[in-house]
Amino acid sequence: MMLATDRNALDRIILGLKDMPGALLPILHAVQKHFGYIPEDALPLIAKALNLSRAEVHGVVSFYHFFRTKPAGKRVIYLCRAESCQALGAVALEHHVKSRLGVDFHGTTADGAFTLEPVYCLGNCACSPALMVDEELHGRVTPESFDTWLAANGKPA
C-alpha cells in the first residue's frame, strides 16, 4: 500500500505531465526517477488519469526493459549487449559479471548494493565492451578491470 507522502508525490507527477501529448512514457520515467522503480500501486492511478486500462499501462511498463517494478540496488550496472560489444568480448564479460555478483539480469545482489541490467547499446562502440554504472560509462571492460572496479566499490574479490 502506498504511503500518503508517496501518493502525494505520484499525484504531483501525474498532474504535471498528464496533459502533454504521449504523456504515459514521460510519467513512467518521472515516477521511476522519483521512486527508483514503478510501484504496482501507481499503475491504476496512472491509468485512470490518462483514461487507459491498467493492462495498457502494465503492458508499457513490462515491454520496456528500462522500467523496474521493484527497487533497484544502490548502484545499477548496465551491461551492453549490442553487436559491437558482443564481438569484442561482452559475452564472456556478461558471464563473469553475473558470476561475481551472483545475479542474473534484472537481479539485485543479496546485500542490495548492485542491480544488473542489460542494455542494447551505450553508444560507446569504439570502446567495446562497455558498461555503465548509474551514469558513469566504462569502456574496454575486461573481467579483470570489472573485478578491480568492483573491489574499489564495495565488493571484495
Image: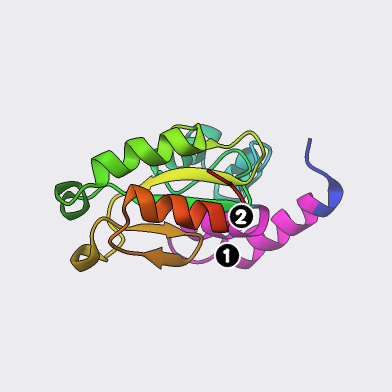
Q: Earlier in the sequence, mark 1 or mark 2?
A: 1
Assign the N terminus to one quadrant of the image: top right
Task: Give the amino acid at mark 2.
Answer: Val
Q: In this rendering, is residue 137 above or below 70?
A: below
Q: Name the residue under label 2.
A: 31
Q: Quadrant of residue 128?
A: bottom left
Tag in front: 1 or 2: 2
Q: Quadrant of residue 153?
A: bottom right
Q: Which residue is drawn at 46% across and 55% down?
A: 148
Magenta-span inclusion, residue 33: yes
* Nearer to me, 108 or 17: 108
Identify the coloring. rainbow
Q: Residue at x 79, y 56 (%)?
A: 8
Tell me: 120 left or right of 96: left
Q: Name the residue under label 1.
A: 17
Point out residue 69 in the picture as x, y percentages from the top left corner: 57, 39
Point out residue 145 in the picture as x, y percentages from the top left corner: 38, 56
* Nearer to me, 87 or 36: 87
Which structural element holds mark 1?
helix
Magenta-span inclusion, residue 4: no
Tell me: 73 left or right of 131: right
Task: Give the amino acid at mark 1.
Answer: Leu
Dominant secondary structure, magenta: helix
Q: How far apart are marks 1 and 2 (CA)?
A: 11 Å
- Residue density around tag 1, few if under 14, some if 14–19, many if 20 or more, within 10 Å: some
**Magenta segment boundaries in residue numbering:** 6-35
